[in-house]
């Protein structure tokens, strides 16, 4: 039986400290490409900006590393993000199956951010990540060739954090990125969302 006279005690939010590293390249010559992996691996631009496909990639790649920032976006918000001139999504396929993706975010003054990058868990550890990152960064550098209204790319940057996979930072450094900023933030310590609610993978940390 409830007691309406008893005040409800507030629940303390569980938080965690997260370290965020920002890295950059300032010349196409900075890129140190990885060797291509063995097997049937292709990287293809997603030519139709489709929120359903983009959200699938986002949750499949980020479900076990706590990617949550886009989960609350509406369909219209997702479409708007994909429709921006210069925004591109490049998808890696292994034997015809989506294995991971890299999303390019066009910014002012010839700057391109690697907004999202990663592999679906089943494809990690197969040397696909270095190849996909190399290819995606090269596409960031030649973005203006496909979008003539944009200035030539002058800088490519990204950020990663301590929630990311254990090999992420090493991959970025091997591809020629340089660290230019480190900061620590306190964030809600959320559970892994998994690729879909109830998948069971959200229990992995």
Image (cartoon, rainbow, N blue to C red):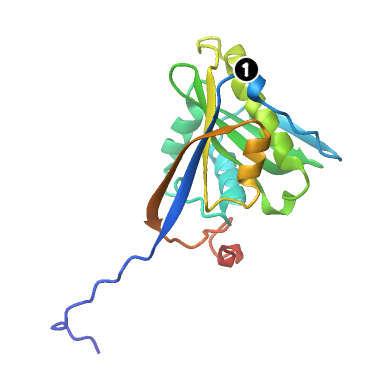
Q: Position of residue 23 (x, y in %)?
A: 53, 34
Q: Position of residue 118 (x, y in %)?
A: 63, 43
Q: Position of residue 41 (x, y in %)?
A: 80, 37
Task: Report which quarter residue 88 is drawn in.
Answer: top right
User: In the rendered image of this protein, does residue 91 appear above or below residue 14?
Assistant: above
The kind of secondary structure element at disc 1 is loop
Residue at 82 percent of width and 39 percent of height: 37
Residue at 73 percent of width and 35 percent of height: 131
User: Which quadrant is home to the N terminus?
Assistant: bottom left
Horizontal side of 34 relative to 189 (left or right) equals right
Q: Nearer the viewer, residue 136 or 177?
A: 177
Q: Position of residue 143 (x, y in %)?
A: 59, 18
Q: Nearer the viewer, residue 178 or 13?
A: 178
Horizontal side of 19 relative to 127 (left or right) equals left
Residue at 53 percent of width and 17 percent of height: 154
Horizontal side of 54 relative to 42 (left or right) equals left
Q: In the rendered image, is residue 82 in sight?
A: yes
Task: Report which quarter residue 109 is drawn in.
Answer: top left
Which residue has dot 1 on it? 142
The residue furthest right is: 39
Q: In the rendered image, is residue 45 in sight?
A: no
Q: Nearer the viewer, residue 181 or 89?
A: 181
């Amino acid at each position: 039986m409830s007691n309406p006279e008893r005040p409800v005690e507030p629940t303390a939010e569980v938080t965690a400290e997260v370290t965020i590293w920002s890295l950059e390249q300032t010349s196409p010559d900075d890129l140190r490409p990885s060797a291509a992996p063995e097997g049937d691996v292709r990287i293809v631009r997603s030519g139709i900006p489709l929120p359903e496909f983009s959200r699938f990639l986002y949750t499949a790649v980020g479900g076990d590393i706590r990617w949550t920032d886009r989960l609350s976006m509406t369909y219209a918000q997702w479409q708007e993000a994909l429709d921006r001139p210069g925004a591109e999504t490049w998808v890696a396929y292994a034997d015809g199956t989506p294995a991971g993706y890299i999303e390019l975010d066009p910014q002012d003054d010839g700057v391109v951010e690697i907004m999202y990058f990663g592999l679906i868990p089943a494809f990690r550890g197969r040397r696909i990540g270095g190849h996909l990152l190399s290819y995606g960064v090269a596409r960031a550098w030649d973005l203006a060739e496909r979008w003539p209204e944009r200035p030539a790319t002058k800088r490519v940057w990204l950020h990663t954090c301590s929630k990311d996979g254990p090999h992420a930072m090493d991959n970025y450094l091997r591809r020629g990125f340089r660290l230019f900023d480190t900061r620590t933030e306190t964030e809600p310590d959320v559970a892994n969302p998994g690729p879909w609610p109830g998948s069971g993978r959200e229990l992995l940390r």
